[in-house]
Image: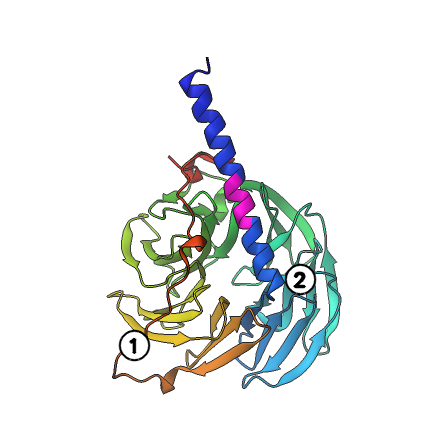
């Protein structure tokens, strides 16, 4: 007869495998219908778009194509500009490489390798001295690169995570964990200390971001909610509901007053970051995978999975009238909650 504890362990292992398989299926779905990621340059003059064909397209601020960066051989899952140098762009691809480009002339600066599984995220520190890359499906590695030498500084085996983001002052790293936990770890502890564990999501967390002043963290994921947290205490500050499918990306406006969320339900929702009020809804023609504010906060770029992205003038939003409703998503997209341990540090493991 199987002992209860052993049975629970078996069930948890099976559940964890199913959880990871579902995440991989979602990535496959997004890639099949063309996953697009967008990011504004620090001065707001250009937009980078990572594509499923392995290219990175560069556009001007009104969406006109400028040039194409060619080098990756598989889908580009993430693009990020160097906050301290508007001519440097990093891209992370399923071909297991991170490429750094000079967007002034389109030249390849360097190619970083070492990840053994699909690269899903890349981000710069605010001062541009470090680059982090997140790779892997079952056990994600976070690699920290010195951008002066392009040498690997450290490798963190944090666990199954989907994204990470530096705090505005560069002292902390927020982590979106597939266990449903948001973690905040300190640079001074090598990003491997006890940190903070933010609990509340009921499914996988796939996106995380900081308020401009570093006092708050916002997260989103499979439970279709956006959650706001106190970055110092870890206290929950609010839960924003309305999306009917996975929240794939969240972003604070540059002034910190609003939060934009992009969802596979085909909508961008704009929220008041203080009251949680859903101020606007932008209804797209396809599932959405990315949203980004222009540095001056006057525009939003968002990416659809039909190989397109759009630019919206925030000032054009109507302040009156009813917010249009979002068509419901079939129930088959729902994911049952899984509360079994994954290989994460104690502060990031589910209860």
- Dot 2 corresponds to which residue? 75
For residue 242, above or below residue 8: below
What segment carries the magenta color? 18-23
In the picture, the disc for residue 192 is: none
Q: Which percent across, then down, holds residue 310?
A: 51, 79
Q: Sequence order check: which comes first, mark 1 or mark 2? A: 2
The secondary element bearing badge 1 is classed as loop
Q: CA distance from mark 1 to mark 2?
A: 35 Å
Front residue of 226/346: it is 226
Q: Which percent across, then down, holds residue 206?
A: 47, 54
Front residue of 238/52: it is 52
Q: Can the viewer see residue 190 in this picture?
A: no
Look at the image and say whether residue 261 sits in the magenta stretch: no
The residue lying at 36 percent from left, 74 percent from top is 281
For residue 143, above or below residue 213: above
The secondary element bearing badge 2 is classed as loop
**Quadrant occupied by the C terminus:** top left
The residue lying at 46 percent from left, 31 percent from top is 12
Residue sitting at the far top: 1
In the picture, the disc for residue 323 is: 1
Observer-side mark, 1 or 2, equals 1
Q: Can the viewer see residue 45 in this picture?
A: yes
Taking the image as shown, residue 257 lies to the left or right of residue 193, namely left
Q: Residue 78 falls in which quadrant of the image? A: bottom right
């Amino acid at each position: 007869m199987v002992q209860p504890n052993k049975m629970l362990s078996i069930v948890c292992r099976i559940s964890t495998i199913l959880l990871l398989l579902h995440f991989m299926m979602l990535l496959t779905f997004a890639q099949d219908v063309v996953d697009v990621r967008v990011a504004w340059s620090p001065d707001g003059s250009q937009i980078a778009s990572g594509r499923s064909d392995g290219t990175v397209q560069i556009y001007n601020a009104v969406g006109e194509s400028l040039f194409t960066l060619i080098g990756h051989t598989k889908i580009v899952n993430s693009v990020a500009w160097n906050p301290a140098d508007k001519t440097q762009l990093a891209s992370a691809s399923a071909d297991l490489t991170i490429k750094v480009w000079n967007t002034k002339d389109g030249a390849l600066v360097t190619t970083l390798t070492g990840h053994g599984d699909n690269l899903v995220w890349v981000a710069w520190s605010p001062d541009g001295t470090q680059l982090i890359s997140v790779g892997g499906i079952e056990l994600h590695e976070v690699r920290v690169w010195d951008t002066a030498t392009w040498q690997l500084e450290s490798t963190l085996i944090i666990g199954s995570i989907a994204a990470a983001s530096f705090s505005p002052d560069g002292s902390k790293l927020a982590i979106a964990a597939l266990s449903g936990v948001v973690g905040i770890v300190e640079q001074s502890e090598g990003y491997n200390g006890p940190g903070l564990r933010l609990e509340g999501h009921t499914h996988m967390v796939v996106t995380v971001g900081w308020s401009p002043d570093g006092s708050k963290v916002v997260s989103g994921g499979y439970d279709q909610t956006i959650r706001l947290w106190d970055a110092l205490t870890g206290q929950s500050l609010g839960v924003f509901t309305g999306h009917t499918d996975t929240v794939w990306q969240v972003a604070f406006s540059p002034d910190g007053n609003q939060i934009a969320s992009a969802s596979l339900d085909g909508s961008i929702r704009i929220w008041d970051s203080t009251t949680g009020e859903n101020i606007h809804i932008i209804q797209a023609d396809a599932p959405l995978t990315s949203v980004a504010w222009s540095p001056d906060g006057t525009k939003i770029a968002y990416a659809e999975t039909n190989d397109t992205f759009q630019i919206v003038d925030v000032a054009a939003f109507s302040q009156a009238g009813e917010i249009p409703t979002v068509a419901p998503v079939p129930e088959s997209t729902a994911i049952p909650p899984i509360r079994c341990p994954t290989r994460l540090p104690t502060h990031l493991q589910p209860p």
